[in-house]
Amino acid sequence: MRSAFRSAQAHEFNPVKIANTLRFLERASEYRGLEHKIVKNLLLARYWENPQNAKESRLLKILGLARLEARLRKNTYEHYNLTLERLNESLGTCLK
């Protein structure tokens, strides 16, 4: 999560969105509700997005499916990022 805040430019920060994001993260830490599940899934998705963490990729290379797997991952994460963008728009947050 730290990298999401460090990668943005200073002019991109919106105080209202930051306040909404902090409130969202506080609610996620208070109890295991919907906010907690969203944050947990965001972190898991970012972890598995890193190709070094995809342990099954070695097996796919052996089977000759590495290109297909890479294309599927790219397409999946494009849709994931669009969904996250829509969530941010609807909640007024800046989750990444």
Image (cartoon, rainbow, N blue to C red):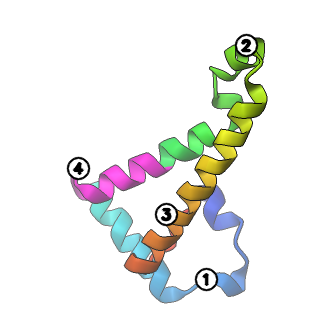
Mark nearest the camera among 4 and 3 is 3
Q: Nearer the viewer, residue 35 or 60?
A: 60
Query: What span is colored magenta in the figure?
Result: 30-42
Residue 40 or residue 29, whichever sits in front: 40
Marks counted in the figure total 4
Earlier in the chain: of badge 4 and badge 3, it is: 4
Q: Is 20 displayed left or right of 5 in the figure?
A: left
Question: Along the horizontal axis of the image, is 66 left or right of 36?
Answer: right
Lower sequence index among marks 1 and 3? 1
From the viewer's perspective, is 58 left or right of 18? right
The residue at 49%/47% (across/down) is 43
Q: Position of residue 87 (x, y in %)?
A: 43, 70
Q: Could one spot residue 1 in this view of the protein?
A: no
- Pointer 1 local density, CA inside 10 Å: few below 14, some 14–19, many at least 20: few
The amino acid beneath tag 4 is: Arg
Relative image position of residue 2 (x, y in whole percent): 60, 57
Quadrant for residue 21, please give it. Answer: bottom left
Q: CA distance from mark 1 to mark 3?
A: 21 Å
Q: Amino acid at mark 1?
A: Phe
**Which residue position is annotated with label 4?**
32
**Does label 3 or label 2 sit earlier along the sequence?**
2
Q: Tell me the CA gap for discs 3 and 2.
A: 32 Å
Q: From the viewer's perspective, is residue 90 above or below residue 26?
A: below
> Disc 1 designates what residue?
13
CA gap between label 1 and label 2 equals 45 Å
Q: CA distance from mark 4 to mark 2?
A: 40 Å
Looking at the rendered structure, the kind of residue marked 3 is Thr
Residues packed near mark 3 inside 10 Å, few (<14), some (14 to 19) or many (20 plus): few
Residue at left offset 51%, top offset 73%: 94
